[in-house]
Amino acid sequence: MTTRNRIESVTDLQAVRERAIKAANTAGASPDRRQVLVCTGGGCIASGSLDVVSAFRRTLAAKGLDGSVQLLETGCLGPCAQGPVVVVYPDGTFYQQVKAADVDEIVDSHLLRNTVVSRLVNRHSGTGELVPLIKNLEFFKKQVKIVLRNCGVVDPLKIEDYIAHDGYAALAKALTQMTADAVVDEIKASGLRGRGGGGFPTGLKWSFARKSPNPVKYVLCNADEGDPGAFMDRSVLEGDPHSVIEAMAIAGYCIGSTQGFVYVRAEYPLAIERLGIAIQQARDVGLLGKNILGTGFEFDLEIRRGSGAFVCGEETALMTSIEGNRGEPRPRPPFPAVKGLWDKPSLLNNVETYANIAPILLKGSAWYAAYGTAKSKGTKVFALAGAVKNTGLVEIPIGMPLGELVFEVGGGIPGNKKYKAAQMGGPSGGCIPTEHLGVPVDYESLIELGAIIGSGGLIVMDDDACMVDVARFFLEFCQDESCGKCAPCRIGTKRMLEILERICDGHGVEGDVERLIELGNTIKDTALCGLGQTAPNPVLSTIRYFRNEYDAHIREKKCPAGACTALVRAPCQNACPAGVDVPGFVSLVGEGRYSDAMKWHRDRNPLASICARVCFHPCESKCRRVTLDTPVAIRGIKRFMVDQPVDLELPEMRPVAANANRKVAIIGGGPAGLSAAYFLARLGYTPTVFEAESKAGGMLVQTIPAYRLPRERLEAEIKLIESMGVTILTDKRLGRDFTLNGLRGEGYQAVFLGIGAMKGSTLGLPNETADGVAEALSFLKAANMGTGVTVGRRVAVIGGGNAAIDAARTAKRLGAEDVTIVYRRRRNEMPAWEVEIDEALTEGVILETLVAPVEVVVENGRVVGLACQRMELGSYDKSGRRRPVPIKGALFTIPVDQIVAAVGQSVESAGLFGDVPVTLNRDGTVKADPQTGRTSVEWLFAGGDATVGPSSVVEAIAAGERAAVGIDAALTGANHAFWREERTVDTAFDPDAEPIYLQRAHECLRPVAERTGSFAEVELTWSETVARGEARRCLRCDYRESC
Amino acid sequence: MADNAATCTCEAVPEEELLARLEGVIAEYREKPGALIPVLQIAQGIFGYLPEVALKRIAVGLDKPYSEVAGVVTFYSFFSTEPRGRHLVRVCLGTACYVRGGKQVLDALKAKLGCDVGQTTADRNFTLEVARCFGACGLAPALMIDDDVHQRVKPARLQAILDRYAVESGDAQPIPGGE
């Protein structure tokens, strides 16, 4: 044990500070003496940092460096995901994910030979460059550390280290140079607001407690950080406990109190231990106790440990608990400043609030108020957690846009998943969806959106999170933690929870959402304390932004995210819009039963060979195998399956005789129409398909190039549909060759509209009608249908979607020398498939990102160039991406002789419907019920791109199936969709066997040299060994114990 | 501070001796305001749980009705009136852990231990509980066995984690965070 000299005056404090700086030499202060700082915050300890500390201790001693290199155990540095982290000073090199085994190398290389160990250094997320110095890390760059100034810098177990970093100087200043009123005024002027969640002005609170007349008052610290997802208070107590002790003493001076209590939750044993040690050290040197710094001021602190009750974070309940009772809240007023702990005036602040006090007194309120917004000053610590790369603690100036916090400080979403929402404020807060990523993170702006800053918990959620389930989770939490004192909270939350549980279990009924809203609002208005009043917020907030998910659970009994187990058989099947039983056909392939596999697949999706090539496979992104290694390559298995030389078998048919006489017309022979025809035929209908072009297939034959989708397979699948009693009439265009009313006149009882979204948008640029400007769909159609296409020598393609890539790769194959894709955002924001972009680049296509076209340059009426503007990223827009904004003066021209515009598609509906009153959506698509496809006209159904705008093949197939069921139900009054019944595949599966440890098989691609001038398919089929091996990687989530 | 030990390593110690220790604690705290909760916390450390006999002694010692003592004990989730296993396994179901698969971890644990939440395994090795956030959100999903936090737990790794505790006798110390 070190014996400590007592500090009895400001001079003593100064002396200790100077001695400490000299002896310990602060981080970076001395160039000749080195320091190794190992984070021993809770996160890093869990990652094994204590082993790293002992390894350093051993190695430094063994190499005789223990005299010249100082080893420090610090509190949390923030980037918990990279733990254990080590910082070596004076240079400030940041090492991450350090294991005890790495220590030798760090000592040998860095400390003895001055060479950074690059394999343990952070890399820039964009460029991949090494970023050795902590000050250059992306994670820290936008942070401002006031609260966390000492976390990760000082040794929390050494008061001298804190004093060396200006510790207790603010207390000294307050006691010797400022009146209590002056201190309170300084806090008021700083604009500091309560960081526990309430956001009440701290200075005002202090002045109330100060004015309250009573000889006995208490200073309280709320460290009952119960909001799941927030851990900044814990980190401050573990990493810099003296900053809280000092601030509480200052508060005692201001309000006239000699006793303080820190209420710490029992889940934080390390925080309790370190705070306890810090308090003892402060007592030992005389910075707590009687006659502090010789000024006659007396103050002491006690720790009270919580016992696991969330409600005790509420201020009145906290005081009731310290008094030794059940932690039930009491009504306010009287407020704690008047009647608090043991009925004495009390000042209660949160840990983070206290941690701000000393810097404000030392550097002044104006310095502090320079950070933040007009109404919310300073910084706020956020605990980033959930689906974000840089999980950990960050401190940012209040007012930073949420998008910047999540994507720049937080590093974005891992695993190529999409941001869905950020849950802020825990069980009292709400969620912020994509369209509001631009919101400045401050008290008022978040409240407007139904969320709160709260205590600073920020949980990022990706597509895998079900918002109904999240709401249920939070409500379950509040329900469980409700103390039971008031009826709205005790009973109301229970009723809400019951409704949410039945929705998640698939038993929700119409009106449930309305009931939740009504109950929620009642509880908000009538509950006794903050817990109850805010408990409905997560539910109301998810209803506000994700109502469609509630509807999907209630109406379709479907959980779109795949999280609600009662509604999800296998996550892949759940993710497939067409509901294909993925584990079923995959396991059949695994057993070599290709014909059975094909039939099993086609039971839900008749266009297997098409989806095997062009489906964007949402199934793979939900594959549970990812928790083990990588997702099963489902599309690759399917590709192998459809290429096996087996004859297509007819699917199961359950014809109803009367249906053959019920005439159904299908307009459009694309995937939606073909799918509708297929499923209707299985019920005994004999629908007629009216196709405008010379071949059925829609987009599949018209715009998707043959190198991605050979035509023979498609023709075989279409032929099979025809053999089921479907008639396909080609060259029949609605509005030209026939009308809707005409079909009715011919006795068609129902009509399905699957006309797609085939109208390409125009650029809206000067000279866009010049010779040499083409629109992508027409360009692709001409190339694919063999109706004569002109291709330039130097081509610019404008756009970032699959059509743009298709056009570019087609142009290249047709002989263009230079093909440049111009896209106004960044590459990772292109809607096109990643692998398609890669292959386009491999084939020599040039990609210009952050470039927007401004004008078509014309000479003699012909295109000679594309004038472009370089862009940079501005603020977050409604799509949740940074809006590209022009860089002034950054103009350039690409010399081209052809421009292909791939900038969007819409539905061509003008004059199409005659006088039939078809209601359209605002974007010109046909309005249809998503479940049945029924439009505003009783006998007219619609689906696919015509109803939702440009979407995917598999979505169209699914819409066709739903419309077939809808049409059948409308004509017969019943649901006959037998293929929707759950069936169990008869393949063998041993649930107790270890999973097969095989790595995911790679795609097999035709060499680039063979692609020039050829439309032969680029992706090749796997060998049988590879395909069956891949199939056996399936974890069989569909498997259920049968009794 | 031994009073925060969540588990009991005291099976061999006779009850009278434990009660005598408790009396000492009561005497020390009797005059302090708000003593009930700290005394209960220490008592749970002594006995491993809060047996009725201890609660009665506390009620008498602190001059409080037994109903008040029982009321406080049942209010807080950390207090248990049932004997606990040698190791307390707490699965975090805080938000971050929940969205990162904490529920799957809990389900797998229930199956592995063969007991439900709040119950103790037949061999009295483990008691299973759920918890609300250890502040290890950066490393979700997390579970805590005694005072060790285990981070980024996957169901497949549970057995290896449990084995480290199951093989120990009651008093050996596990390797902290060694995975």
Image: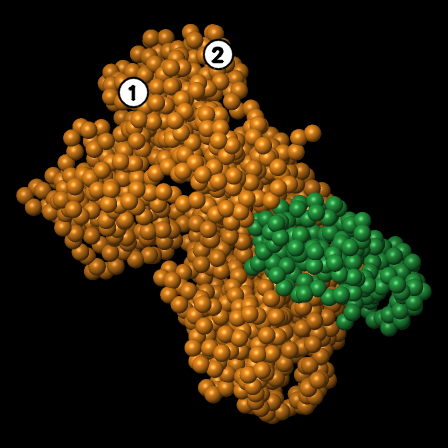
Q: Chain of mark 1?
A: A
> Horizontal and vertical percent for residue A863?
12, 44
Render colour scheme? by chain
Circle 2: residue type:
Pro
- At mark 1, the secondary structure is loop
The circle on residue A655 is 2
> Horizontal and vertical percent for residue A504?
60, 37
Q: Is residue A325 visible?
A: yes
- Residue matched to label 1: A691
Query: Counting other residues with Cα less than 10 Å from the Cα at mark 1, is it few (<14), some (14-19), or many (20 or more)?
Result: many
**Rendering quarter of residue A130:** bottom left
Circle 1: residue type:
Glu
- Depth check, front residue: A549 or B175: B175
- Depth check, front residue: A28 or A1017: A1017
- Rendered residue at 62%/42% (across/down): A993
- Rendered residue at 32%/48% (across/down): A838
Q: Colour of chain B?
A: green
Query: Counting other residues with Cα less than 10 Å from the Cα at mark 2, is it few (<14), some (14-19), or many (20 or more)?
Result: some
Q: Is residue A619 visible?
A: no
Q: Colour of chain A?
A: orange
Q: Is residue A882 left or right of residue A488?
A: left
- At mark 2, the secondary structure is loop
